[in-house]
Amino acid sequence: MSAASTYAIASPPPYDSPYDTANAGQRIPWFGNDQVDDCVIVARAHHTIRLDYAYSKPVPSISISDVINEYRAETDRTGTTTIDLGHSLREWRDSGWTVGGGALRKIADVYGPYLPTPPNPPPNYPDSQMAPAQIMNGIYQYSGAHVQLLLPQSIDSSAPDSYGNQILWSDTSGFPARAHAMLLTGYDHNGPIGLTWGVRQHMTWEFLHRYCSYPLLTGIFFVIRGETT
């Protein structure tokens, strides 16, 4: 996928995925991220639901155990307690995962990582980067985007006043410190909207650029739905 391959298809801001629009008042599950560091698999669970909905398939019932079991399986294979987002997405493509005791689910492919440009990108930037318009197009076309961030220490799930639907992540003064993955499902005039820690989280394009601009540590990924996703 070229960074410039999905142009002129995205809905203008504001936009959210069809599932989130239809279920605006529904509780957003943590999927165990208050118990273990399974944010990468949490993003996968959120995306699985939205991919099925986008293709008019029954929305799966994904449990906390489904997510934590996959997290533990992947950390056991790597011998670590954390999961690299890019590696995990390739695991989803190559090995798949199961939810609700059902059949194995696999995506067809994964594109990335891409790094975001500044909100007003220079005329010529590398194909490994994506401008805000391209990120919006990717979210629109692929029913979401997986993003790995290095959040500042001031933002943490144990500090409820540091995140939430009414809080805009806009402060870029903090030092990038804590790896965190989430699924981006939409965008508004400020920037992208993602799902994390049981909330819909808004951020600015400046924030995304600040905390997602470190090769090998951060990035934006898009997955291609498969027959069994």
Image (spheres, rainbow, N blue to C red):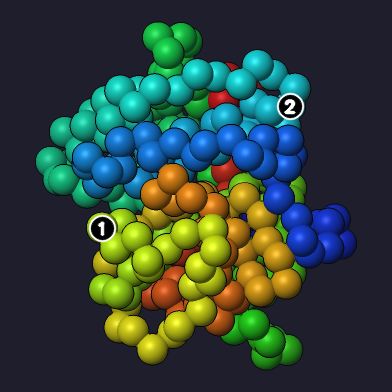
Q: Name the residue tied to disc 2.
A: 55
Q: Residue at x 46, y 9 (%)?
A: 102
The tag earlier along the polypeptide, 1 or 2, is 2
- Above or below, 203 relative to 199: below
| Residue projecting furthest to the right | 8
Dot 2, how many residues are within 10 Å of its Cα: few (below 14), some (14-19), or many (20+)? Answer: few
Find residue 31 and report its horizontal and vertical position in percent: 37, 34
Label 2 amino acid? Answer: Tyr
- Image-quadrant location for residue 148: bottom left
Q: Name the residue tied to disc 1.
A: 158
Q: Residue at x 83, y 57 (%)?
A: 11
| Helix, strand or loop for disc 2 | loop
- The reply to whether the C-beta atoms of the residues labelled 1 and 2 are less than 8 Å apart is no
Q: Nearer the viewer, mark 1 or mark 2?
A: 1
Gap in angstroms between the C-alphas marked 1 and 2: 36 Å
- Above or below, 6 relative to 116: above
Dot 1, how many residues are within 10 Å of its Cα: few (below 14), some (14-19), or many (20+)? Answer: few
Find residue 182 and report its horizontal and vertical position in percent: 45, 52
| Helix, strand or loop for disc 1 | loop
- Above or below, 190 relative to 46: below
Q: Residue at x 37, y 45 (%)?
A: 40
Whether residue 114 is visible, yes or no, is: no
Find residue 3 and report its horizontal and vertical position in percent: 66, 65
Label 1 amino acid? Answer: Ser
The C terminus is located in which quarter? top right
Q: Residue at x 43, y 18 (%)?
A: 99
Find residue 50 and report its horizontal and vertical position in percent: 62, 34
- Above or below, 220 relative to 18: below
